[in-house]
Amino acid sequence: MEKKVSSSVINRLPRYYRYLTDLEANGIDRISSKELSEKMGITASQIRQDLNCFGGFGQQGYGYNVKHLYNEIAGILGLKSQYKAILVGAGNMGQALIQNTTFEKRGFSLIGVFDIDTAKIGKKIKGITISDYNNIKNFVEENHPTMAIISTPRTVVNQVVSDLTDLGIKAFLNFSYAEIPHSEDAVVENIHLSDSLMRLCYKISAKSDKTNNKN
């Protein structure tokens, strides 16, 4: 029977990958769970529990081989698969995502960008020509992308997702500020930057209240 891994463990895997990327870049060959915990701000016990979900990878008295663990987590996350992705909505958010995201290092190859704005269509961003959204059907049928990044105005999100779902796309990374419903047939990540701002606001407020109560 396949072991079910909790969503909290899965959510921490990209953090492990980021820290291991930095460690490898700095020429560090091995690291203990204690040392890694100090860098990441989580307990060594939690790190061992998380990694034991996938086999452990560590050796008593040695710790973790950084390159080996880096490669193992990359494999677990599927980063070597290079799934094909498209982006719909080449406004400020969409262009920022293209300019600042290394898709290839995150398991995806960005193969197409689409918009309805005639002022944007035909322009290039990092070597990719912005195409007319009205031609997306032919593109998807010819190239078979797995995932769509949505950065359109929220008013058209449902229609875009419906269009792409009908074309066979079942994975969405959504930056549109409108929630894409989860379903059994689709893999969805709704990214709400405003939620992060509000959580930060709450933490600042809570910390301020705690400080004031001490005075």
Image: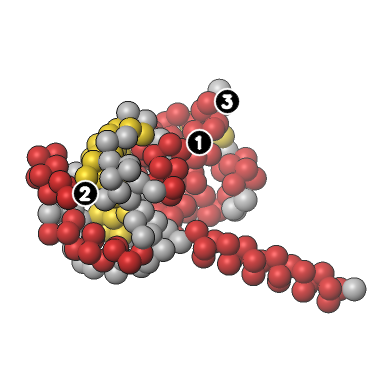
Q: Residue at x 55, y 23 (%)?
A: 27
Kindly state the secondary structure of the residue where label 2 is placed. helix
Give how far across and how far down residue 104 sits, in percent. 34, 34
Residue 179 lies in quadrant: bottom left
The 10 Å Cα crowd at callout 2, few under 14, some 14 to 19, many 20 or more, is some
**Mark 2 touches mark 1? (CB < 8 Å):** no
Looking at the picture, which amino acid does disc 2 mark? Tyr
Specify the amino acid type for callout 3. Answer: Asn
**Quadrant for the C terminus in the image:** bottom right
Relative to 36, is 207 on the left or the right? Answer: right
Name the N-terminal-most of marks 2 and 1: 1
| Residue located beneath label 2 in the image | 133
Q: Which label belongs to residue 26?
A: 3
Q: Nearer the viewer, residue 149 or 46?
A: 149
In the displayed orientation, state which residue is furthest to the front: 119
Q: Nearer the viewer, residue 5 or 79?
A: 79
Distance (Cα) linking label 2 and label 1: 39 Å
Q: State the mark number for residue 98.
A: none
Q: Residue furthest top?
A: 27
Quarter of the rendering occupied by the N terminus = bottom left
Left or right: 200 with respect to 174? right
Residue at 32 percent of width and 35 percent of height: 123
- Coordinates of residue 76 in the picture (x, y in percent): 33, 43
On the image, numbered disc 1 is attached to which residue?
20
The x and y percentages for residue 204 are: 70, 65
Contact between marks 1 and 3 (CB within 8 A): the answer is no
First of labels 1, 3 by sequence position: 1
